[in-house]
Image (cartoon, grey):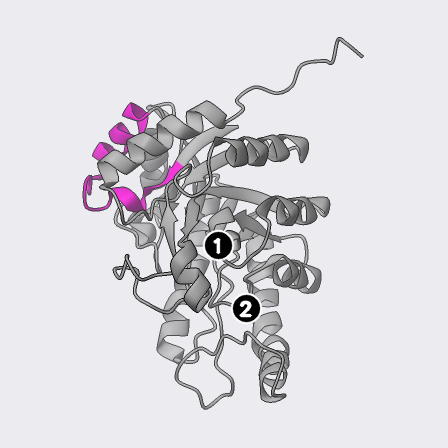
Amino acid sequence: MKLGVLTAVFYNLYPKFENMLDKVKDLGLEAVEIGAGNYPGSAHCNVREIISSNNKAKLYKEEVEKRGLTISAIAVHGNPLHPDKSIAREHDENIRNAILLAQKLDVPIITLFSGCPGSSERDRFPNWVTCAWPDDYPNVLNWQWKEKVIPYWKKMGKFAEDHNVKLAFEMHPGFVVYNTETLLKLRENIGNVIGSNFDPSHLFWQGIDPIASLKKISEGGALFHIHAKDVKIDGYNAAINGVLDTKKFTDIKNRSWLFRIAGYGNGYDWWKNFISQLVKEGYDYVLSIEYEDALMSEEEGMKKTVQFLKRVIIKEKPTEIYWA
C-alpha cells in the first residue's frame, strides 16, 4: 500500500507543478491524485494541452516518475447531472477529458461524484432527496434515477470502458450516490466500470460504520481507490441539531461536525482497524490524503497527517503464516 495526496491542498502553497511534486516527495509520499477540473480545479494540469500532445503527456509523466512518484488517479468531482444545462455541459466535458487524460498518462482510475439532478425538467437547482414521505420525494427520486442518473452514467461508463479507465465514485451527501446502497445500485445498473473512491469521512457523520461499508463494497470488487480524511462530530452541537448541518464550514464553533486530518477525528485504534481491513480485502493500492481541516494550516496539517498515517499504514504484503 502506498501513501499519496490529492494535490489540491498545494494549489496556493505550490502553484508550480514541479514545486508541488518536490514538496510531495519531501513529505515522504509516493503518489499524487491530480485535479483535472470541476470542483477540484486543475491548477497543476493543463488537461487539453496534455491530451492533445503525446510529447506533452510524456514530459508530464516523466516529471512525476523521476521523483519516484506515481499518479494514483485523476480527480474531476462535479455534477454533470446539474439541471442548469451550462453547468452540466461543462462538468460532462471535464469528465470526458479526464478519462482521455487518464488513458494518456496510463492512470487506471478517475475519482468523481455521481451528481444530482433537479426534481423535474423545469428545475434550476439540484434536489437531493433524503426522506421517504410525503410521496413527492420518492417520486422525485425514482424520476431522477430513471430519467437522468442511469441513462447518463450508462453512456459515460461505456466511454470510460472504451478508454480502459474505471470510475471511482466518492459517496457524498448532496449527490445521488452518498452511501453504500446507492453506490452499489449505480454499479448494478451500469456495470463493473463503476466502483468506490472510499472516503470514510463522509460516512462517519451520516451514522454509517465505514468498515462495515468497506466490507460490503469490497465483496463485489468495487473498491477502487481510498481517500484518507477524518471527521470530528461535535457532541454538543450534534445533540442539539443532529448531523444534517447546513451551516458554512467557516462557522467552525457552531457546526455539528468538521472535516479533520486523520487521527483528529478518530484515533490510532480506528485507523489501524481500517488499514487492517483494507489488507483483509486485498486492497494494495494508494491511500490518498484529502486535506480539508479548518483548524490548522496546510503545512502543519499535512506534516501531522503524513506522520500519523505512516504509523498505521501497512506497506508490505503479509508473509506466509509459519505458525499454523
- Residue 34 occupies quadrant: top left
Q: Is residue 298 left or right of residue 106?
A: left
Magenta segment range? Answer: 5-27
Q: Of callouts 1 and 2, which one flags the residue occurring earlier in the amino acid sequence?
A: 2
Q: Is residue 26 magenta?
A: yes
Q: Position of residue 318 (x, y in %)?
A: 65, 19
Q: Amino acid type of disc 2? A: Val
Q: Position of residue 92 (x, y in %)?
A: 44, 66
Q: Is residue 90 left or right of residue 287?
A: left
Q: Residues within 10 Å of mark 2 (few under 14, many from 20)?
A: many
Which label number is shown at residue 63? none
Helix, strand or loop at label 1? It is helix
Q: Is residue 266 magenta?
A: no
Q: Is residue 227 left or right of residue 36?
A: right
Nearer the camera: disc 1 or disc 2: 1
- Residue at image position (41%, 34%) is 4
Does the magenta stretch mainly form a helix, a strand or a loop?
Answer: helix
Q: Which residue is mark 1?
A: 202
Give the total number of marks visible in the rendering: 2
Depth check: give the residue in front, 294 or 171. 294
- Residue 91 occupies quadrant: bottom left
Depth check: give the residue in front, 175 or 162. 175
- Residue at image position (43%, 25%) is 310
Query: Height in image: 302 above or below 316?
Result: below
